[in-house]
Amino acid sequence: MNTKLYIEKYILPYESSENQLAYEKGELEYDSDYIKEHKLDNEEWHWGLESRGITYRGITNDNTREITYDDTRDIAIRCVDSLVGMGILVDDDDCNGTFEVQDLIQIEINKVLKLDIDNNFKITINDRE
């Protein structure tokens, strides 16, 4: 896998929307040392979890990835964070509906993926390169 694809597949999805935009505009670059360290951390994390019987949800050798109900919650949280960062939602002590928006986003993602916390907690997808 080339460096650009690795960044887009395994680094950018977990970056802030500001960093994602900066990368797309060419204003943000990842040096080779950072990428090597990221790959090593992912590998160590993978084996550390696997040895404890925990499913790994990242890079796999067979181009598959598991997506869980927890993953969709994390995506929803990042969406709400982006909406707050863009000034579309206001984040204060009362949350003013941010949790409801987060729940709505997660529900819609789960519908598409046919995920359910009780009956279908995870799915496996094929990553296309």
Image (tube, rainbow, N blue to C red):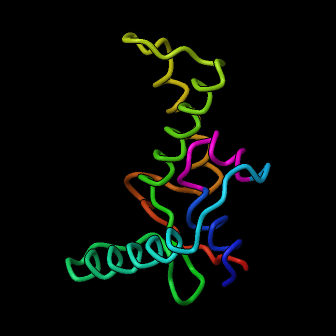
* Residue 117 spot, x, y in % from top left: 40, 51
Q: From the viewer's perspective, is 2 left or right of 50?
A: right
User: Does the magenta run of residues contain 56?
Assistant: no
In the image, 9 versus 126, the foreground residue is 9
* Residue 9 spot, x, y in % from top left: 63, 67
Residue extending furthest toward the bottom: 62
Which residue is found at the position 61% from the left and 57% from the top?
12
Which residue is found at the position 59% from the left and 18% from the top?
89
Residue extending furthest toward the left: 52
Query: On the image, which quarter does residue 47 sit in?
Result: bottom left
Which residue is found at the position 58% from the left and 57% from the top?
114
Where 68 sits versus 34, above or below?
above
Where 32 sits versus 14, above or below?
below
Where 80 sits versus 118, above or below?
above
Q: Which quadrant is the N terminus positioned in? A: bottom right
Q: From the viewer's perspective, is 118 left or right of 20?
A: left
Q: Which quadrant is the C terminus positioned in? A: bottom right
Which residue is found at the position 64% from the left and 18% from the top?
87
* Residue 71 spot, x, y in % from top left: 47, 54
In this rendering, the count of numbered labels is 0
User: Does the magenta run of residues contain 16?
Assistant: yes
* Residue 65 spot, x, y in % from top left: 53, 74
Q: From the viewer's perspective, is 15 left or right of 42?
A: right
Secondary structure mostly taken by the magenta-highlighted segment of the chain: helix
In the image, 18 versus 102, the foreground residue is 18
In the image, 26 versus 67, the foreground residue is 26
Magenta range:
13-23
In the image, 9 versus 60, the foreground residue is 9
